Amino acid sequence: MAGTRGKTDMMTVSAPAKVNLSLRILGKRPDGYHTLESVMQMLALADTLTISEADALYFTCSNPALESADNLVMRAAQLLQGISPHSLGARMHLEKQIPVQAGLGGGSSDAAAALAALNVLWDIRLPLDKLATLAATLGSDIPFFLNGPCALVCGRGETVYPVVHQTPGHVVLVKPSAGLSTPRVYADLHADLLTESSQTGQLPETMALLQALNSGNIEAVAHTICNDLEASALTLLPELTNLRARMLQAGCLAVILCGSGSTLCGICDSSSRSLTIASMLANDGLWTWAGDWLLPTDNS
Ligand code: C5P
């Protein structure tokens, strides 16, 4: 959650998108999930959740297709409601900016924003670690969004180590009209696409990325980004290969798939370059966004 505004009887909460600067899949677990090692970074692109007290739970959304009882915002509220001895309600409205099936973590971020805001609004005062444990039962990425703006995420996603760095990142996001289903991308991940790990510590490439973020050198960051889901996503959606080539040709330092896709994230050396590439590809009818990633100072 990037921040809350307002009195405690009416709150406006920002729910930022994320990009995985690295996503290494280390193996499949007996429960069907995968063990991963990922450096996740929040972006300035965000949904906005407005919450006020009410007699029961109500949920509306600027995108009517998402306005259902199984939306993660509603499920997060019900989960928190379930651990309180009191009868609690809230009116929740979500303004969507983050596209769906995009790999940008929008739904997970919305859920984290709801958990954090309702924990305050309902005066439940669950400590952050307990809230994160609860969040992990709803979705693997949600614990990260209770932390941030940057973190090393391990296990299924429930182990989150905040990473504090001050390297500014100018990015351009480009999403084809087709989305990608996360379970489908994981299902097509064959054993030879996994990253071998001795399980004795962080992978060398994760260490290199963390060092690059620490050094403030965006070119070093661009050279160390990686995503094990790319091969599977590019097979499912071949147009991503051409799109990535166009983004590199237009001047991105590096291009990476966001999570399980279908958004591509280009890292640029300036905000003017990311804006230029975004407007060029928007002319082709693609969804684009240009902006910066969040630094600790943006997250107060
Ligand atoms: O936890 P969440 O419901 O967000 O995960 C969505 C899908 O992503 C899962 O159904 C699974 O296919 C895949 N996944 C995985 N391993 C993880 C996280 C997600 O296989 N650590």
Image (cartoon, rainbow, N blue to C red):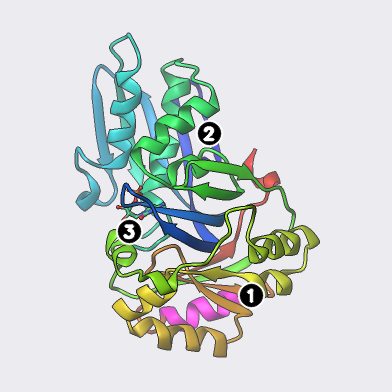
Whole-percent x, y for residue 49 in the image: 40, 39
Task: Indicate whether 221 appears above or below 236.
Answer: above
Q: Nearer the viewer, residue 208 or 34?
A: 34
The answer to which of marks 3 and 1 sits earlier in the sequence is: 3
The yes-or-no answer for disc 3 within 8 Å of ligand 1 is no
The amino acid type of the residue labelled 3 equals: Val
Q: Is residue 199 left or right of residue 283?
A: right
Please report whichever mark, 2 or 1, sits nearer to the chain's N-terminal start: 2
In the drawing, does residue 224 fall left or right of residue 157?
A: right
- Residue at which label 1 appears: 268
Residue denoted by label 3:
100
Give the secondary structure at mark 1. Answer: strand
Question: What residue lies at 34% left-to-right and 17% top-to-bottom?
Answer: 83
The x, y position of residue 207, in whole percent, is 69, 60
User: Does the magenta portion include 279?
Assistant: yes
Q: Residues within 10 Å of mark 1 (few under 14, many from 20)?
A: many
Asked which secondary structure carries label 2, the reply is strand
Q: Which quarter of the figure is the C terminus placed in?
A: top right
Disc 3 packing (10 Å; few <14; some 14–19; many ≥20): some
The residue type indicated by label 2 comes to: Thr
Residue visible at 37% across and 79% down in the picture = 234
Using a 10 Å C-alpha cutoff, classify the residue at mark 2 as few (fewer than 14 neighbours), some (14 to 19) or many (20 or more).
Answer: many
Residue 239 vertical placement versus 183 (above, below): below
Residue on which the image places disc 2: 4
